Amino acid sequence: FSLVLTAEGHLYSFGFNVFGQLGLGHTNDVNVPQRVHGFDDVVTSVSAGTHHSAAITTGGRLWCWGWGYQGRLGHGDNTDRTRPTAVASPAQMTVKLVAAGYMCTLLVDADDAIWMTGRLCWGGPSSTTFTRVQIPGTPSRPPLRFAAVCMGSCHALAVTTDGGMFTWGEGDHGALGHGTTEHNDVPTEVHALKNTHVIKAAAAYSTSLVLT
């Protein structure tokens, strides 16, 4: 399925819709873009996961809908939503960035911290509400702040404001860049890029790309 955001802040969707991920109030497939309604403000950013969707509106409010299994929508349950539904985030946090994957959703808040809901990979930790992602201690660096996050199917990439690169999740085919194919539930710096300033990252099924 596809999501399209216009310059006016209007969201359109079309394609596969078995779990209501198009946000149109039903689960029928759609072959022509249709406008998604239900937001209380202008949409500024969107992300399409495998079977769910996420959007940010002006002021940093987060909305999630589609397949609710494994708590990936962050609403405190496993219920599917066929319409955009505002997430009751901790302390009414302001959301800057959002990335939807297969079973989970990641966000970056106004303090440049990462939060996650759902389950990143099979056998890993899970939650039905957004919880802050804990990063292992890095005593040689200032407190970590994140400028970007992205997701493959079951792995995640995060870029720090000082150009560092962290990955975690399923390591199949070497997707995490740590020199192994092992899975890792803890965000870990990619040492092969430690002396490189990363500015962007992108992830697909079991593949990761980094731009310096």
Image (spheres, rainbow, N blue to C red):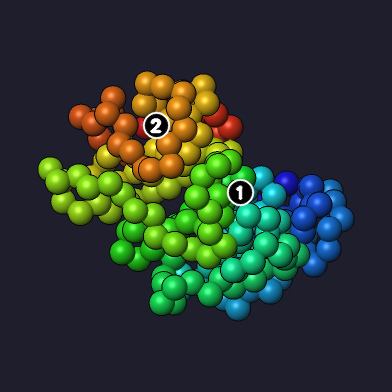
Disc 2 residue type (three-letter):
Val
In front here: 205 or 178?
Answer: 178
Question: Percent x, y for residue 6?
Answer: 61, 59
Disc 1 residue type (three-letter):
Met
**Badge 1: few (under 14), some or many (20 or more) residues near its Cα, within 10 Å?**
many
Question: Percent x, y for residue 177?
Answer: 39, 27
**Circle on res. 103:** 1
In front here: 74 or 59?
Answer: 74
Q: Identify whether 187 is placed above or below 105.
A: above
Identify the residue at image location x=69%, y=74%.
Answer: 38
Q: Is residue 96 visible?
A: no
Q: Is residue 85 visible?
A: yes
Is residue 85 left or right of 156 when viewed as pictured? right
Instruction: Say which element carries label 1.
Output: loop
Identify the residue at image location x=44%, y=77%.
Answer: 92
Q: Distance between the residues labelled 1 and 2?
A: 23 Å
Question: Percent x, y for residue 210?
Answer: 39, 31
In front here: 150 or 141?
Answer: 141
Question: Percent x, y for residue 76?
Answer: 59, 68
Q: In which quarter of the image is the C terminus?
A: top left
Is residue 25 left or right of 41 when viewed as pictured? right
- The residue labelled by disc 2 is 210
Looking at the image, which residue sits at the far front? 123
Q: Identify whether 58 is placed above or below 131.
A: below
**Residue 187 location, quadrant:** top left
**Badge 2: few (under 14), some or many (20 or more) residues near its Cα, within 10 Å?**
some
N-terminal of the pair, mark 1 or mark 2, is 1
**Residue 78 location, quadrant:** bottom right
Instruction: Say which element carries label 2.
Output: strand
